[in-house]
Amino acid sequence: MNKQISAIMSLESIIDTFRLAIYFILTIGVLLVSFFPEGWLLFFYLNTEPELLHCLLAPLYFFIAYCITVIFYGVIHSQLVVRLTLPYRIKPGNYPHHSSKGRLIAIRLTADGIFKSMIKVFTFLPFVWGIFLFPYLMRLYGLKCGKNVHIATNTWIDCPLVEIGDNSFIGWNSVLSGHANENRQFVIEPLKVGKNCTIGSYCVVGPGVEVGDNTMLGIMSGWKKGTKVPPNGVWVGAPAKRIKDRHLKNMEPK
Ligand SMILES: CC(C)(COP(=O)(O)OP(=O)(O)OC[C@H]1O[C@@H](n2cnc3c(N)ncnc32)[C@H](O)[C@@H]1OP(=O)(O)O)[C@@H](O)C(=O)NCCC(=O)NCCS
């Protein structure tokens, strides 16, 4: 019986390793293909007589080509490569780092990395553009978020494990983590931020945290793993303590 179990487990780990290999190969392939528009433009400029109009419009052409690259890469990579080879949603539980499932999860949690870096270049004014575009683009990688959500570009969010309610704001350099690394294993617990919440800059919110509606977390503050935060409060510190009530009037945009 034990032999059968270990045979099944080793077969599973071989399949997982195969999935990872396919993931890396497909990712590099999609990355290369998505830069074709820039390659084509370069080819065009190197093989034609320089004309003033085309030289003046070159930055615009390359910007449009880069937009196509980012959208193409994001859609194909998230919807095809990630869905085909990695677990798109991660089930809560404990996964040892060295196990094949642990490796799959580590790669899944960082799968949006290249796309994020591309957006940061694309939104060359990240603090202005990024905030508005970011939530929509991160949905491709599994982030569940409501309407009017603003997320600063330079944040770390475990997309497949995080849910953010309507009208919430996630500040610069904050971390919403649906995983913890404990005793050489990934502890996976989804994280939920309610409606009308503001998470300040440089905050850390751990796995399993459930933030009630209308909550504010001050700068450089955090909630530890599994905290259930009641609604309508202002919280500061690490671990955060409630300092006062928060009363919000009509949050609907005019
Ligand atoms: C939490 C916050 C809203 C509190 O502002 P406030 O209502 O004006 O409250 P106060 O500044 O009077 O602070 C009340 C108490 O909390 C403490 N406090 C406030 N912010 C704190 C923080 N981030 N960490 C620890 N303590 C904090 C104050 O020292 C004060 O303590 P005291 O009464 O012992 O002196 C504000 O400090 C904050 O962090 N805003 C977030 C801004 C932000 O990140 N925006 C996003 C940008 S991308």
Image: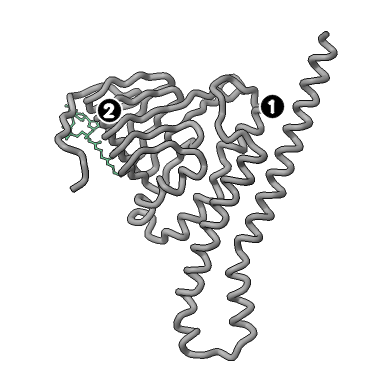
Q: Is residue 40 left or right of residue 247?
A: right
Whole-angstrom CA distance, mark 1 to mark 2, is 38 Å
Q: Residue 173 carries which label?
A: none
Q: Is mark 1 on a helix, strand or loop?
A: loop
Q: Name the quadrant of the N terminus.
A: top right
In this view, the mark in front (1 or 2): 2
Nearer-the-camera pick, 211 or 148: 148
Amino acid under disc 2: Asp
Residue 107 placement (x, y as % from top left):
62, 38
Q: In which quarter of the image is residue 253?
A: top left
Tell me what residue is drawn at x 41 percent, y 61 percent. 124
Residue drawn at x 59%, y 20% as measured from the top left: 94
Using the image, determine if residue 76 lies above or below residue 89: below
* Mark 1 vs 2, N-terminal side: 1
Q: Residue furthest right?
A: 3
Please, what is the three-letter code of the amino acid marked with disc 1? His
Residue visible at 54% across and 22% down? 92
Viewer-closest of 40 and 80? 80
Q: In which quarter of the image is ligand 1?
A: top left
- Residue underneath mark 2: 213
Residue occupying image coordinates x 35% and y 51%: 132
